[in-house]
Amino acid sequence: MKGITRGFLVSLGIPTVFFPGLILAAVLGWNWPKDLGRLREAGGYKGAKIIFPQEGKVEEVIDGDTFVLENGQTVRMIGIDAPNRGEAGHEEAQKYLTDLIDGETVGLEYDSYQDDKFGRILAYVWESCSASVGCRDGRRMLNLTLVREGKAKVVFYEDRRKLRYEKELREAENSN
């Protein structure tokens, strides 16, 4: 490889927001051929398990739809929106999610949108279960659970691709 190019970074699926930093790192001596080669072997940016893990232990719940994993990554639950700090219902939604997952290992499933402009990974969050409401095949999706329990509302963007569980989330919201 001769040089780090926009086309090469695009071929790896790396978001354009990272390009200036990667190019600067290369200019400053980063061994990009080795590291980006490893990223390519891992399936590119969106396929890299270190960037998008399949599971993780919850270290801290930030609010009713966002939490931090033990590895430091912040996860935002896709397709839903819980009240933010200062809004009615924030503390209740945060406590509900904390009671569900704090200190637990959760499964993470990704859709076509895997991260956002704030550096958070976007995921459907799954927990193991045996007899809980919404439990199927030994697990339940917490995004749906939060909507069913009235702790979060469904949020979709009309100008974006339809989400995998959009229908189920809308049905959960309509059943309240």
Image (tube, rainbow, N blue to C red):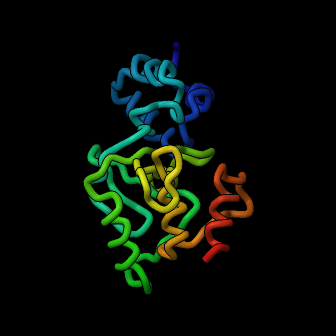
Q: Identify the residue at horizontal 58%, vertical 25% (top origin).
A: 8
The residue lying furthest to the bottom in this view is 88
Residue 15 found in image quarter: top right
Q: Identify the residue at horizontal 58%, vertical 33% (top origin).
A: 13
Q: Identify the residue at horizontal 48%, vertical 62% (top origin).
A: 133
Residue 71 found in image quarter: top left
Q: Nearer the viewer, residue 142 or 159?
A: 142
> Would you place residue 109 above or below residue 148 in this image?
above
Residue 56: where, in percent of width, then height?
Answer: 34, 43
Q: Is residue 176 left or right of residue 124?
A: right
Q: Is residue 29 left or right of residue 41?
A: left
> Would you place residue 86 above or below residue 135 in this image?
below
Q: Identify the residue at horizontal 40%, vertical 17% (top origin).
A: 34
Residue 113: where, in percent of width, then height?
Answer: 59, 48
> Would you place residue 130 above or below residue 22 in this image?
below
Residue 111: where, in percent of width, then height?
Answer: 60, 46
Q: Nearer the viewer, residue 123 or 165?
A: 165
Q: Nearer the viewer, residue 25 or 162?
A: 162
